[in-house]
Image: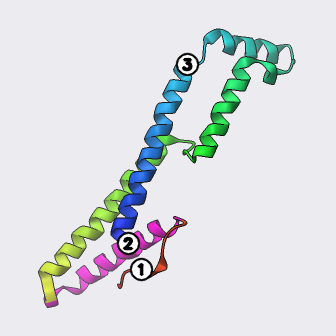
Amino acid sequence: MDLVAFLTARLDEDEAAAKAAQNADEQHERGMPEAAMREAIDLAGRRERVYDSPWWAANMKYWLDRRAWGWPNDPARALREVEAKRRILAAYESAERDRIAYGDAEPEWHIMRRTAFLHACELLAAVYSDYDPAWKLDG
C-alpha cells in the first residue's frame, strides 16, 4: 500500500462513519417520542432528576454509543472535510500524471506545485494512527 491508497481508504472510512452518524442522528430524532421529551422537560422544570426519565436514558445511551463507535459529532462537517481532502488528493494525482507526461522537461513551477500537494497529502495521512512514515513520498 502506498500513501495515495492509504489516504483513499481512510477517507472512505471517514465518509462511511459520517454518513452512518448522519443516518443515526435522523433515526434518533424520529424515534424520540414527543411525550418522552416533554416528560423530561417537565422534570427539569420542577428541578427533579431528569436522568430518571426514559428519554434521558435513551438519549444518554445513544450519545455514549456514538462515542464508542467513533462517529463525528458534526457529520455534515466531517463530510465536507472528506470532500476537501479528496480534492487535495485528486490535485496531487493530477500533478503526478502531469509529471509523467512532462518527463525530464517538467517545468520548475510544476515541480513546486506537485511538491506542495504531495506535502499536503502527507499531512492529511499523518493524522491517522496507522500511518506508516515509510509511505512518505519523495518530493
Q: Residues within 10 Å of mark 2 (few under 14, many from 20)?
A: many
Report x, y in % for residue 125: 45, 67
Left or right placement of residue 91 versus residue 7 in this view: left
Residue tagged 1: 136
Against 86, residue 94 (above or below) is: below
Mark 2–mark 1 contact, CB under 8 Å? yes
Report x, y in % for residue 131: 49, 70
Type of amino acid under label 1: Lys
Which residue is pictured at 43% across the width and 52% down the height?
A: 13
Disc 3 secondary structure class: helix
Type of amino acid under label 2: Leu
Q: Earlier in the sequence, mark 3 or mark 2?
A: 2
Report x, y in % for residue 121: 39, 69
Extent of the magenta region: 104-128
Q: Name the residue nearer the viewer: 67 or 79.
A: 67
Q: CA distance from mark 1 to mark 3?
A: 46 Å
Which residue is pictured at 35% across the width and 73% down the height?
A: 2
Against 48, residue 121 (above or below) is: below
Q: Name the residue nearer the viewer: 20 or 46.
A: 20
Q: CA distance from mark 3 to mark 2?
A: 41 Å
User: Tag on residue 3?
Assistant: 2
Tell me the quadrant of the picture where the C terminus can be found: bottom left
Q: Earlier in the sequence, mark 1 or mark 3?
A: 3
Q: Earlier in the sequence, mark 2 or mark 1?
A: 2
Residue tagged 3: 31
Disc 2 secondary structure class: helix
Report x, y in % for residue 59: 67, 27
